[in-house]
Image (cartoon, rainbow, N blue to C red):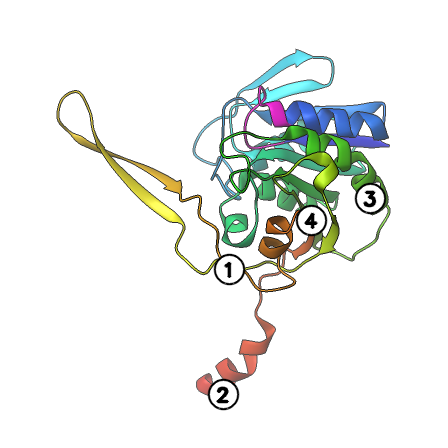
Amino acid sequence: MRILVSNDDGIGAPGLAVLEHIAGTLSDDVWVVAPETEQSGASHSISLADPLRLREHSAQRYSVQGSPADCVLMAVKKIMPDVPDLLLSGVNRGQNIADDVTYSGTIAAAMEGTALGIKSMALSQGYGVESGRELRWEVARDHGPGIVERLMSLDLGPGVFLNINFPDCKTDDVVGIAVTRQGKRDQNMLIVDERVDARGRNYYWLGFAREMSKPAEGTDLKAVYSRQISVTPLHMNLTQIEAMEALRAALD
């Protein structure tokens, strides 16, 4: 089995090393194609107005000066000898749950793999719930191989990929695995941090507030807050079927 590994935190990210370990427990044919620099928040963008620069670091390990989706495209269309059997994206520095999935480059790499007909999974390690700024990579490292192995043979139909989130707790404190739906935070987590540079000019950082919400049962949010590993099937088709009849009635 040939596995493609990518991410959005960049070729030097510690989470990528964790994912390489996970992939290595499942196959001896692992290819890494990741962004040259951090691409968090890049979403499903591709570089149409700029050239892509490719760098080979070692055998079957490359970086691309571009987005996570660029990396997957380059891997499949240019770098790899054949289409991979499985794409793993991550392990992301921080959870990708609820509204996060629309911004996430980690999710986008899995989306691009799915668009190319490759079975794909996005993996993320949560933090900020119990451990503050510390990331407990060992949770993903210890639990990831078994979960991916159990899920990689599933046929969930065209356009479906998996979003896996590991909770912020000790490895032995994980209480199980929950199949979840995408949740919705009950507050606006995006913040604009205004600062002043050395010349007295204002500049701004976009970021997310690390606050606990009160999520509904059955959601990815609730699972991760409850020390469960969340597995959410996401779909490439964003059509809201239930709204179509109302639209037809309004437009007839």
Q: Secondary structure at mark 4?
A: strand
Kind of residue indicated by mark 3: Met
Q: Secondary structure at mark 2?
A: helix
Q: Nearer the viewer, residue 63 or 21?
A: 21
- Label total for image: 4
Kind of residue indicated by mark 2: Ala
Distance, label 4 to label 3, CA atoms, is 20 Å
Badge 4 is on which residue? 228
Badge 1 is on which residue? 214
- Of badges 2 and 1, nearer the viewer stands 1
Name the disc covering residue 152, or none.
3
Query: If you read the primary sequence from the N terminus, does the residue marked by circle 2 or circle 1 appear first?
Result: 1
Q: Quadrant of the N terminus?
A: top right
Q: Secondary structure at mark 1?
A: loop
Q: Which residues are magenta?
A: 7-15
> Horizontal and vertical percent for residue 165?
65, 44
User: Is the residue marked by circle 2 packed among few (<14), some (14-19), or many (20+) residues within 10 Å?
Assistant: few
- Of badges 2 and 3, nearer the viewer stands 3
- Vertical placement of 64 versus 92: above or below? above
Kind of residue indicated by mark 1: Lys
Q: What is the residue that sits farthest to the top in this orientation?
A: 58
- Of badges 1 and 3, nearer the viewer stands 1
User: Is the residue marked by circle 1 packed among few (<14), some (14-19), or many (20+) residues within 10 Å?
Assistant: few
Residue at image point 54% right, 54% down: 98
Q: Nearer the viewer, residue 234 or 178?
A: 178
Distance, label 2 to label 3, CA atoms, is 42 Å
Query: If you read the primary sequence from the N terminus, does the residue marked by circle 2 or circle 3 appear first?
Result: 3
> Horizontal and vertical percent for residue 168?
61, 39
Badge 2 is on which residue? 249
- Vertical placement of 222 versus 30: above or below? below
Residue at image point 35% right, 40% down: 206
Query: If you read the primary sequence from the N terminus, does the residue marked by circle 4 or circle 1 appear first?
Result: 1
